[in-house]
Image (cartoon, rainbow, N blue to C red):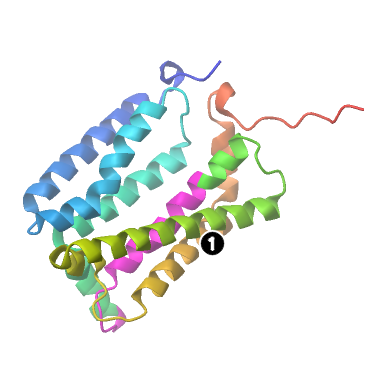
């Protein structure tokens, strides 16, 4: 039988985090100067929140993944308030690094690789879809790059449909290689997640309710 949220002691904290995120999202919508861009930037948050809530009972995630998803949502919401090219933190980072453009969008694309890498790894391990660590490493990066490529296609579609919303949503800031660097940062995020978090992730996978843990491989029958 699937694990249920009744057996999950993290449920009060998860509910509190969800309510906090909803409050932050609502405040950000009120603060945002460009409502259309805010909607485009925060739409993933609006999709992820109900999805995580509805799937928690049958498919609870590791605490690590919930925390990373929460942080990713904050990055998206902050970018939605100001647009990625106009974030105050990005301007501070630009001055500190001595770059010519606001680099906040690269943080967003790094997280776009970092968090999905952990999510893809968790799904592959729990479903016992891939046993070899090298193939799993490769497939996780493939998922990361596929998500990044799809997002760039969405940005392209927005650019075709709305010139006004496209400039703020794309945030290229005159960089002709913005699309390539965005995907590069997503790849970097995926690599960092796979190189830095496996041990912590594996420990947390074993702490999940019994029905949600990684299945133990059974010996082949003769």
Q: Which residues are magenta?
A: 97-119
Is residue 160 on the magenta stretch? no
Furthest residue toward right:
222
Quadrant showing the N terminus: top right
Question: Is 20 left, or right, of 48 in this rendering?
Answer: left
Q: Secondary structure under badge 1?
A: helix
Q: For residue 70, which quarter of the picture? A: top left
Is 105 covered by the magenta stretch? Answer: yes
Q: Quadrant of the C terminus?
A: top right
Is residue 191 positioned above or below 103 on the image? above
The quarter holding residue 172 reads: bottom left
- Residue 87 visible to an observer of this rendering: no
Q: Position of residue 71 (x, y in %)?
A: 33, 49
87 displayed left or right of 119: left
In the picture of the structure, the residue carrying the numbered disc 1 is 191
- Asked if residue 137 lies left or right of residue 77, the reply is right
Q: Residue at x 23, y 77 (%)?
A: 173
Residue 48 percent coordinates (x, y): 33, 40
Q: Residue at x 34, y 64 (%)?
A: 107
């Amino acid at each position: 039988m699937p694990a249920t949220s009744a057996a999950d002691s993290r449920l009060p904290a998860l509910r509190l985090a969800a309510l906090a995120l909803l409050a932050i999202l609502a405040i950000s919508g009120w603060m945002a100067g460009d409502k259309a861009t805010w909607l485009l930037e925060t739409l993933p948050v609006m999709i992820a929140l109900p999805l995580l809530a509805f799937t928690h009972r049958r498919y609870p995630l590791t605490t690590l993944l919930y925390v990373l998803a929460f942080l990713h949502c904050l990055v998206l919401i902050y970018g939605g308030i100001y647009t990625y090219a106009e974030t105050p933190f990005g301007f501070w980072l630009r001055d500190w690094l001595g770059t010519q453009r606001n680099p906040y969008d690269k943080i967003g694309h790094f997280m776009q690789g970092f968090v999905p890498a952990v999510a893809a790894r968790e799904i592959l391990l729990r479903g016992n879809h891939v046993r070899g660590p090298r193939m799993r490493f490769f497939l996780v990066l493939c998922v990361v790059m596929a998500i990044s490529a799809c997002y760039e296609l969405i940005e392209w579609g927005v650019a075709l449909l709305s010139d006004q919303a496209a400039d703020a949503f794309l945030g290229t800031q005159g960089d002709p290689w913005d699309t390539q660097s965005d995907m590069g940062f997503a790849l970097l995020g995926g690599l960092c997640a796979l190189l830095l978090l496996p041990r912590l992730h594996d420990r947390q996978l074993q702490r999940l309710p019994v029905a949600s843990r990684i299945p133990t491989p059974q010996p082949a029958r003769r």
